[in-house]
Amino acid sequence: MKIIDLTQTICETMPVYPGTEQPKLTVANTHEKDGFRETLISFYSHTGTHMDAPFHIFADRTRLNELPAEQFVGKALVIDCRNVGAGGEIGMEYVEKVRELADKAEFLLFNTGWDANWGKEEYFGEYPVVSKEVCQYVLDSQKKGVGFDTIGIDPISGGNLTLHRMLLSQRDIVIIENLTNLDKIGGGLFTFAALPLKYKDADGSPIRAVAIIEE
């Protein structure tokens, strides 16, 4: 069994969505003074590698803590779309290339290669985004979730959050953003686990996302 970590590390200098604050990691207790180490952590619920719940956009939709644990684990497929380029659209042709496996997957993870820009100004640029047709396929095929190695499913300039609204208004599905290391997985199905914090009225949460590959 091989485990691949797909999670960006939370730190005080990390990229965050424009308009939110970076995390604060304050040492509350020290080995020298208290005999143990403890950290006071403060961050937004959509910090780092995280997932969005339907409640993130819609007040009457499902909160993250209301979803069953099986929502966060399942068979996944990475779709390689690294040749799309900045500002490009990922259309159904990328899904069709691997349609047989895509139909079997419970999660689709889109490898744009944009995580190479993590920590750079370019990360907030015009990254590739999926088309409405891809989102409709995700809905029609009853996926548990979709994931991206970018800061959002919608364009950074897309204030209407059109794709968020399209997906989260209709089904109990999760959107996962800021993934990394998708290029290390390969082209087959694998077990994907992305477990959020379970807090009351959760609109989203940082996750520890991993790929579990049987060897």
Image (cartoon, rainbow, N blue to C red):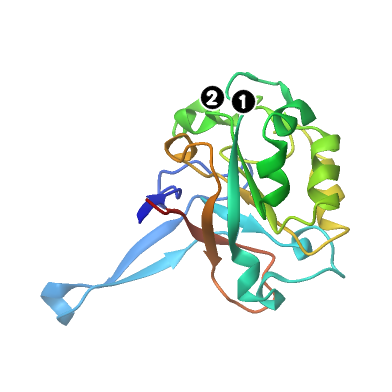
Q: Is residue 75 above or below residue 110?
A: below
Q: Is residue 41 left or right of residue 72?
A: left
Tell me the kind of residue under disc 1: Gly
Q: Quadrant of residue 82?
A: top right
Q: Which residue is mark 1?
A: 125
Q: Is residue 162 above or below residue 128?
A: below
Residue closer to the observer: 113 or 108: 108
**Residue 196: x percent and y percent?**
55, 66
Q: Which residue is mark 2?
A: 122
**Residue 33: x percent and y percent?**
14, 77
Query: Count the marks: how many?
Result: 2
Q: Is residue 161 visible?
A: no
Query: Which residue is depicted at the point 66% across and 43% down?
Result: 101
Q: Is residue 28 visible?
A: yes
Query: Which residue is depicted at the point 53% across and 56% down?
Result: 192
- Position of the N terminus, as image quadrant, is bottom left
- Residue contact between numbered discs 1 and 2, judged by CB atoms under 8 Å: yes
**Residue 126: x percent and y percent?**
66, 24
Q: Is residue 182 above or below residue 40?
A: above
**Circle 2: is it few (<14), some (14-19), or many (20+) Cα within 10 Å?**
few
Q: CA distance from mark 1 to mark 2?
A: 5 Å
**Residue 156: x percent and y percent?**
70, 33
**Circle 1: is it few (<14), some (14-19), or many (20+) Cα within 10 Å?**
some
Q: Quadrant of residue 29?
A: bottom left
